[in-house]
Image (cartoon, rainbow, N blue to C red):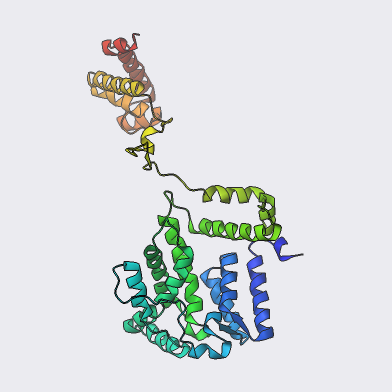
Amino acid sequence: MSTADLPEDIRPITHIQDLVRIGQKRGYVTSEEIMALVEEYDLTAKEIDDLHSQLFDQSVEIYDQSLGTPGSLDDATEPILDLSTPTVTHDPVQLYLHQVGTIPLLSRDEEVQLAQRVELGDKRAKDCLIQSNLRLVISIAKNYYTQDMELLDLIQEGNTGLIRAVEKYDYRKGFRFSTYAAWWIKQAITRGIANQDRSIRIPVHMINKINKLIRTERGLVQEMGREPRDDDVATRLGMEPHQVEQIRGVARRTTSLETPVGEGEDAELGEVIENQSALDPADEVAKKMAKDCLHRVLESMDERERKVIEFRFGLKDEYPRTLVEVSSRLNVSRERIRQIEAKAIERIKAASEIQAMREP
């Protein structure tokens, strides 16, 4: 049986074990391989920790391909992203990139030393570890950039994930901080997109499914040379075709009712769309008049009659009460409540104002 035939909650475990075996054979795995696994199966922070623990227990090295070979990790000083920019600029994005680009990267030993100090509550060490990895946030945020969300907004979301990663990082497991932080940064950016990029908020787990669907469809297009059908995508993802359609339906953007319309864009979409659930204006006026009329008739009754009608029909709180409840509240027998109610209803029907409203 192939891994695609396994239940969805089992497949990540199988692929984690496969990656550990690969690492045992060659002595190392790359951070890119780990992040590919994280993105493919939306691994949780605990699952990522478990993966790193297994690799550490098996003496498997983790290295970043952008930083060189496994043996040169500790001496890596090359920037993850080219942030060269003029020193004089009025563009806030370029200014931020330039400022971040001047912060030196950390070696593995420096990361460990700072992480040890962070555990002891050293705020300066925490700030240093955060600042030294701001360019990692920029590198990841650029991959999520669209016209719908500013790059600085994405970076700000990613920075919250970086801060969380610093607080959760366990240097004893032997992996680079950047490898661990990347998951938290991507998770924070994804959550930010879910909260801000759409008129209606989409849960983060659904955003992850949408991203996974998009990646799968792109891969199938390259493999098949055509647009994949829902059943093609469903087979690859290990789900039913109707589930694929549900995810695709959630992914469709919602148009804001505040979208400008018309030649001069002087109106909003919400102003020209019929609200089919709303009452006709004439019906609303009639309903309001009837309510006011009933209120005046009730005011002309004695207090007991008025309370019986209000309780029985929920006129005060929209909660109609039973004869037993009204009897208990007014300390009167159920039969007496029934008689008062019948008499009050007859008085309402006979009221001249009510009669006038019933006439065509």
Quarter-of-image position of residue 61: bottom right
111 lies above or below 5: below
- Horizontal side of residue 3 vs 157, given as left or right: right
Instruction: From this view, report whether residue 208 is shown above or below residue 54.
Output: above
Q: Nearer the viewer, residue 104 or 85?
A: 85
- Residue 53 image offset from top left, x and y in percent: 57, 80
- Residue 219, image x and y in percent? 64, 61
Quadrant in which the C terminus is drawn: top left
- The quadrant where residue 328 appears: top left
Q: Residue furthest top?
A: 359
The residue drawn where x is 36% and y is 34% is 271
The percent coordinates of residue 321 (x first, y second) are 38, 30
State whether residue 237 appears in this view. no
Report whether 97 appears left or right of 67: left
Task: Give the residue displayed 62% in from the left and 57% down from the top.
Answer: 217
Eyeballing the image, is 287 above or below 39?
A: above
Rendering quarter of residue 126: bottom left
Q: Nearer the viewer, residue 211 or 219?
A: 219
- Decide if residue 296 is in sight here: yes
* Quadrant of image for the N terminus: bottom right
Q: 31 and 354: which one is in front?
A: 31
Left/right placement of residue 327 relative to residue 202 reads left
Residue 194: x %, y % from top left = 45, 57
Count all numbered tags in the image, as a single digit: 0
Q: Which of 226 and 23 lies nearest the eye of the viewer?
A: 226
